[in-house]
Image (cartoon, grey):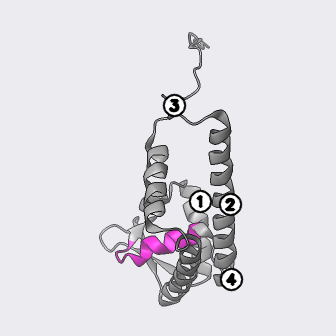
Amino acid sequence: MPSTRPSEGEREHLLAYLRVCYWRVLGELDRRLEETGLTARQFLLLRILEEGNPVNARTVGQRLSVSPANVSGLVDRLERKHYLKRSRSLEDRRKVFLEITPEGRKAFRKARRDREVLLRVVFDGIPLRERRMMVKGLRKMATRRLPGPVAPTRPRERVTS
């Protein structure tokens, strides 16, 4: 009975094609976003704000998986472009909420349209059945637990003063 496991060569081809597709599509998405004056992270932050309710920087950081310092930088740059505004909570002045502005909404919608056009070009040439198979396979890859490095455990040294 033939093996259903991919050979080393097949695994290398899978990895190479994943890498090429990832960089080609992301590179083109970044280029198109640049034309709107947004980076990928700025686009994602505006997408969060576009959902409607004002959110705080901590929530944005969690949703984007970035540090508070990175969120602060993103917010500063988008605020300078007048794409978002900060507002303080009336109940607790320490809490700051972020809201998208009309200019930010306009920039986000243009970027989203450009992104959608590119994604159509990339994916619409692939039959539906094959796209579904790719999603199924990629979902399995994305959710599969990967083995971490096996590090030998060493007794911790005590520091005494």
Q: CA distance from mark 1 to mark 4?
A: 22 Å
Crowding near the residue tagged with mark 4, few <14, some 14–19, many ≥20 C-alpha atoms within 10 Å: few
Viewer-nearest of discs 3 and 1: 3
> Residue flagged by tag 4: what amino acid is it?
Glu
* Side (left or right) of 15 relative to 52: right
* Side (left or right) of 10 relative to 89: right
Residue at numbered disc 1: 70
Labels 3 and 1: the sequence-earlier one: 3
Residue at numbered disc 4: 35
Q: Is residue 13 above or below residue 149?
A: below
Residue at numbered disc 2: 23
Viewer-nearest of discs 2 and 1: 2
Any part of residue 21 in sight: yes
Residue, x 52% and y 69% (percent of image)? 44
Labels 3 and 4: the sequence-earlier one: 3
The number of callouts visible is 4
Labels 3 and 2: the sequence-earlier one: 3
Viewer-nearest of discs 1 and 4: 4
Seen as rendered, the residue at the extreme front is: 1
